[in-house]
Image (cartoon, rainbow, N blue to C red):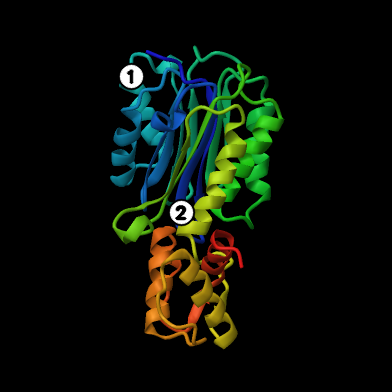
């Protein structure tokens, strides 16, 4: 059994119904162990000699209507090694609970508040958990994913894992928000081994927003003749468009631009009318300089 010494936060956004976990640890691939979540049910972080069965078992208990504290009581009472476990739970009503076993390595502890639970072990000090809590509480204007990552950053600045940094992960679920709308896995990002895993997690969250969250900061340009000519010229140079440079956003031009969009994995930003997403234009301009 390996100890998963880490700090984490589980959170709920009542405005969007998103549930999520953010975690960092001096441990390879922490995202494969700690975070568990189910849309409309809850989110769980299990760490410190982590019992990964707490994830699915705890979510099932939450789905049955049990509150987070009762879920923790059930899980730990049935576990002979509960004194070495650490767990945080939040449900889809914003109720939260955290547990730190008496044999967790210091500093170890947790804190709860409205819509969140945070916890950590083998930390520099209690200041790490305090920073998780305070940052989450003070940034309700942020979307839940950015809010959770901001909490991680503040916690690291406050001290973090006393052994250092290695991996980080962010899991956010929402009903029907997964790719193509077929599951609830809205954001599932892992930094497995990196000298600055939280900064890297923040960077790839930004990429996720570009490719898979077109509703944020989305802006469009109408394809007037001048822009149509630019698109045709750039797509010609890239080998996507083979027609005349007629400054018309006709079907041949639209199909060529769609092919480019699909190649760049920007299909979530595609539309069939005479408007084009600014991110698609930016990608086209960066790929083929005028």
For residue 30, side relative to residue 179 (left or right): right
Which type of secondary structure does the marked residue at label 1 adopt?
loop
Q: Position of residue 250 (x, y in %)?
A: 42, 86
Q: Residues within 10 Å of mark 2 (few under 14, many from 20)?
A: many
The residue located at (39%, 31%) in the rendering is 32
- Please, is residue 207 above or below residue 230 in the view? above
Q: Position of residue 40 (x, y in %)?
A: 36, 53
Q: Quadrant of the C terminus?
A: bottom right
The residue where tag 1 is placed is: 79
Q: Nearer the viewer, residue 33 or 278?
A: 278
As measured in the structure, the alpha-carbon distance from the residue carrying label 1 to the one carrying label 2 is 30 Å
The residue located at (63%, 43%) in the rendering is 150
Q: Position of residue 279 (x, y in %)?
A: 55, 65
Which type of secondary structure does the marked residue at label 2 adopt?
strand
Task: Indicate the quadrant where residue 200 lies.
Answer: top right
The residue located at (65%, 33%) in the rendering is 155
- Please, is residue 281 above or below residue 153 in the view? below
Task: Indicate the quadrant where residue 67 lies.
Answer: top left
For marks 1 and 2, the one nearer the N-term is: 2
Tally of numbered discs: 2
Instruction: Kindly identify which numbered label has been placed on residue 18.
Output: 2
- Please, is residue 250 above or below residue 17 in the view? below
Instruction: Kindly identify which numbered label has been placed on residue 100.
Output: none
Is residue 245 among what the camera can see? yes
Task: Indicate the quadrant where residue 130 lies.
Answer: top right
Mark closer to the observer (1, 2): 2
The residue located at (45%, 67%) in the rendering is 269
Q: Quadrant of the N terminus?
A: top left
């Amino acid at each position: 059994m390996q100890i998963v010494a880490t700090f984490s936060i589980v959170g709920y956004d009542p405005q969007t119904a998103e549930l999520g976990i953010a975690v960092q640890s001096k441990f390879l691939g922490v995202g494969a162990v700690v975070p568990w979540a189910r849309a409309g049910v809850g989110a769980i972080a299990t760490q410190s000699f982590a019992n990964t069965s707490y994830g699915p078992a705890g979510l099932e208990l939450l789905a049955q209507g049990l509150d987070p504290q009762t879920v923790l009581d059930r899980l730990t009472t049935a576990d002979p090694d509960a004194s070495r476990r650490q767990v945080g739970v939040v449900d889809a009503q914003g109720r939260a609970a955290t547990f730190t076993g008496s044999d967790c390595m210091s500093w170890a502890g947790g804190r709860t508040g409205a819509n969140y639970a945070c916890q950590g072990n083998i930390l520099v000090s209690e200041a790490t958990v305090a920073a998780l809590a305070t940052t989450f509480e003070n940034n309700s204007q942020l979307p839940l994913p950015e809010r959770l990552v901001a909490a991680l950053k503040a916690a690291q600045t406050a001290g973090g894992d006393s052994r250092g940094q290695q991996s980080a992960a962010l899991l956010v679920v929402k009903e029907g928000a997964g790719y193509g709308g077929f599951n609830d896995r809205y954001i599932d990002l892992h930094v497995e081994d990196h000298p600055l895993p939280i900064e890297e997690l923040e960077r790839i969250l930004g990429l996720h927003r570009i490719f898979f969250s077109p509703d944020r900061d989305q802006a469009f340009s109408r394809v007037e003749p001048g822009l149509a000519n630019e698109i045709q010229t750039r797509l010609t140079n890239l080998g996507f468009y083979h027609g005349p440079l007629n400054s018309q956003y006709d079907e041949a031009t639209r199909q060529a631009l769609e092919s480019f969009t699909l190649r760049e994995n920007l299909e979530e930003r595609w539309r069939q009318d005479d408007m084009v997403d600014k991110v698609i234009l930016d990608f086209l301009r960066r790929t083929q300089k005028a």
